[in-house]
Amino acid sequence: MPIPQSTQELKAILERDVVLAAPSLIGWRILAEKCLVEIVETEAYRWDDPGCHAFGRNRMKNMAMLGPFGHAYVYFTYGNHWMFNVVAHPAGDGSAVLIRAAKPLEGGEIMAARRGRTKATDWLSGPGKVAQALGIDSAQNGIDLFSTGETPIRLLPPERESSNVLVTKRIGIHPEKGFDTPWRFVNSDAVEFSSKPGLDKSKLNHLAQRQNNT
């Protein structure tokens, strides 16, 4: 599928539709100080989705997920993992894209040290790993990811024009909270850098094929 090439184009998608924004972010890059990575796996979470933190309107007023689209939403889970998300939809809506995996481009020594791993395919192959490798924690919560000023983390446009995107069910979701919702998106050309559960390519739907048949 085509990758949005400009900040303006991606921001328009983020504002309009989190489910479209999730695959659109694949191929975009994250610059976190001296580390540069390419997003290869995402998941969408929408305000009316039982798996979303904002579902049911039981939401903290200061939750960054309710902030402006294009900002970071970082939360702590399972007692030891930070999770990095890109906020979508207008402020107050409560939707976001979880960055599940990425491919390292620059700063490998830093990421290897933070992760305590030597294999590049194990530095960013999961959402908790992404945050750890890039040094993301609560200090980045709420940051404008498109800021042109000095910032510890930002989103940068892709280096290519399209990506082959696979679609599957989200991971770690309770059966009653949207387990079967096909809102997980993976770059099929970089599966080795993604989190692996459910990635039997022969059984997955190709996003481009699905779009052509609708």
Image: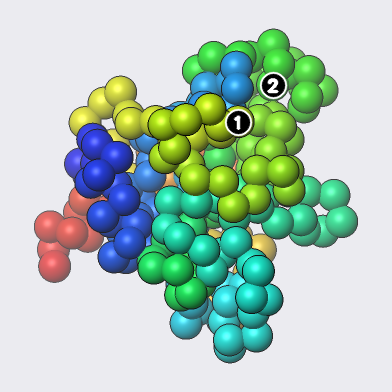
- Where does the image place residue 71, in percent across and percent down from the top left? 50, 51
Q: Which residue is mark 2?
A: 111
Give the mark nearer the N terminus: 2 vs 1.
2
Separation of marks 2 and 1 at Cα, in angstroms:
15 Å
Residue at (29, 65) in percent of width and height: 16
- Which residue bears the numbered disc 1? 152
Q: Is residue 35 above or below residue 172?
A: above
Helix, strand or loop at label 1? It is: loop
Residue placed most toward the observer, 118 or 192: 118
Image quarter (top left, top right, bottom left or bottom right) of the C terminus: bottom left
Instruction: Compare residues 182 and 32 and report the one nearer the observer.
Output: 32
Residue 206 horizontal/vertical position (percent) = 29, 51
Any mark on residue 135, and which? none
Q: Quadrant of the N terminus?
A: top left
Asked which secondary structure carries label 2, the reply is: helix
Is 106 situated left or right of 127 in this image? left
Residue 115 visible, this angle: yes
Whether 166 is drawn above or below 49: the answer is above
Q: Residue at x 78, y 49 (%)?
A: 81
Where does the image place residue 24, in percent across and percent down from the top left? Answer: 32, 48
Whether residue 51 appears in this view of the structure is: no
